[in-house]
């Protein structure tokens, strides 16, 4: 049996559900059961009788992550544990720069000159790195950065409030890029309240795709990180390690896909 350790309060987010489904299916195919480990509880006691553990988006200050890494069993982590030595853990992560540059270059190609970024805070390596890459891109393009950090689990309502504040600025952004899962929906509501047409005089995009983004009007451009495939890939690495007793080589960067929808069609 293998365990899967999730951050606190992410169970409602699509990305994590799809990751769990992918990991569970791969474990089942290999003849293993998978159990969810509860963040915030005694992680080591939960780990007893497990062959290995998957950690998904470890957060800073989570003592459970540190305990799992130090326990000695095989660990595969999706994203590097922030502020910790990962030890022998295999870290699987995307190319953060490639993701942010693809999104921001796309926005620039569609006419954006003042892209703002609503980040996911600094409690995760993912949140830290994509914010850093936004600032790097702005520096290379000589664009004044507008970075507003919020929480890793910010809701669409929270993001909508931040977007409303941004759009009230003397020189508001002409594009808004968001990081928290599913939260770009809040930007659509804020844009409408300001009389803006999303996709024409305000571009909107997200760093994580969501099924809902396909069905709103306009659809929201986003990066598909293929979480089901990622979950399966992480589980396979862990199962190979458990089966052979030999740590596999570090994984290549996770592939991603930019899904372009109506929210970034640009002025016609």
Image (tube, rainbow, N blue to C red):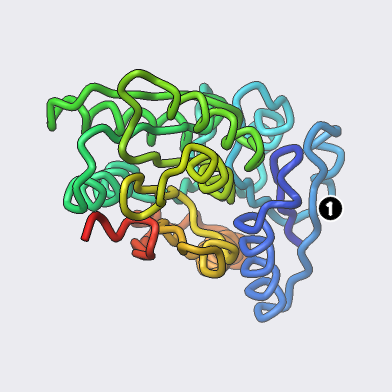
In the orientation shown, which residue stands out farthest toward the bottom? 29
In the orientation shown, which residue stands out farthest toward the front? 195
Q: In this rendering, is residue 37 above or below 30?
A: above
Q: Quadrant of residue 265?
A: bottom left
**Can residue 161 be seen in this snapshot?**
yes
Q: Nearer the viewer, residue 43 or 229?
A: 229
Q: In this rendering, is residue 66 above or below 192?
A: above
**Side of 170 relative to 110 (left or right):** right
Q: Nearer the viewer, residue 235 or 264?
A: 264
Residue at horizontal 40 percent and vertical 51 percent from the top: 197
Quadrant assignment for the N terminus: bottom right
**Side of 222 relative to 61 (left or right):** left
Q: Position of residue 143 (x, y in %)?
A: 18, 27
The crowding category of the residue bearing disc 1, from other C-alpha atoms within 10 Å (few below 14, some 14 to 19, many at least 20), is few
Quadrant assignment for the C terminus: bottom left
**Side of 267 relative to 205 (left or right):** left
Q: Position of residue 236 (x, y in %)?
A: 55, 67
**Side of 243 relative to 218 (left or right):** right
Q: Which residue is mark 1?
A: 49
In what element is the residue under mark 1?
loop
Q: Position of residue 73 (x, y in %)?
A: 67, 46
Q: What count of labels does the image hold?
A: 1
Residue at horizontal 85 percent and vertical 33 percent from the top: 42
Residue at horizontal 50 percent and vertical 24 percent from the top: 165
**Can residue 237 be seen in this snapshot?**
no
Q: Nearer the viewer, residue 43 or 9?
A: 9
In the orientation shown, which residue stands out farthest toward the top? 170
Residue at horizontal 59 percent and vertical 30 percent from the top: 161
């Amino acid at each position: 049996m293998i365990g899967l350790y999730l951050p606190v309060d992410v169970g409602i987010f699509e990305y994590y559900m799809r990751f769990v489904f992918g990991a569970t299916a791969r474990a089942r195919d290999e003849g293993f059961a998978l159990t969810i480990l509860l963040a915030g509880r005694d992680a080591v006691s939960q780990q007893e009788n497990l062959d290995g553990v998957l950690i998904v988006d470890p957060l800073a200050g989570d003592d459970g992550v540190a305990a799992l890494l130090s326990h000695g069993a095989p660990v595969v982590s999706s994203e590097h544990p922030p502020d910790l030595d990962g030890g022998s853990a295999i870290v699987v992560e995307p190319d953060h720069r490639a993701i942010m540059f693809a999104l921001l270059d796309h926005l620039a190609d569609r006419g954006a000159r003042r892209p703002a970024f609503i980040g996911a805070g600094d409690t995760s390596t993912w949140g830290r790195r994509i914010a850093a890459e936004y600032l790097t891109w702005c520096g290379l393009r000589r664009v004044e950065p507008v970075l507003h950090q919020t929480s890793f689990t910010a809701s669409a309502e929270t993001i909508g409030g931040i977007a409303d504040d941004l759009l009230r600025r003397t020189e508001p952004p002409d594009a808004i890029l968001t990081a928290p899962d599913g939260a770009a929906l809040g930007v659509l509501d804020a844009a409408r309240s300001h009389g803006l047409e999303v996709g024409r005089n305000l571009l909107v995009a997200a760093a994580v795709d969501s099924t809902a983004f396909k069905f709103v009007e306009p659809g929201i451009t986003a990066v598909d990180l293929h979480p089901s495939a990622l979950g399966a890939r992480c589980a396979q690495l862990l199962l190979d390690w458990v089966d052979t007793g030999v740590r596999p080589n570090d994984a290549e960067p996770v592939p991603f896909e930019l899904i372009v929808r109506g929210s970034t069609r640009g002025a016609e």
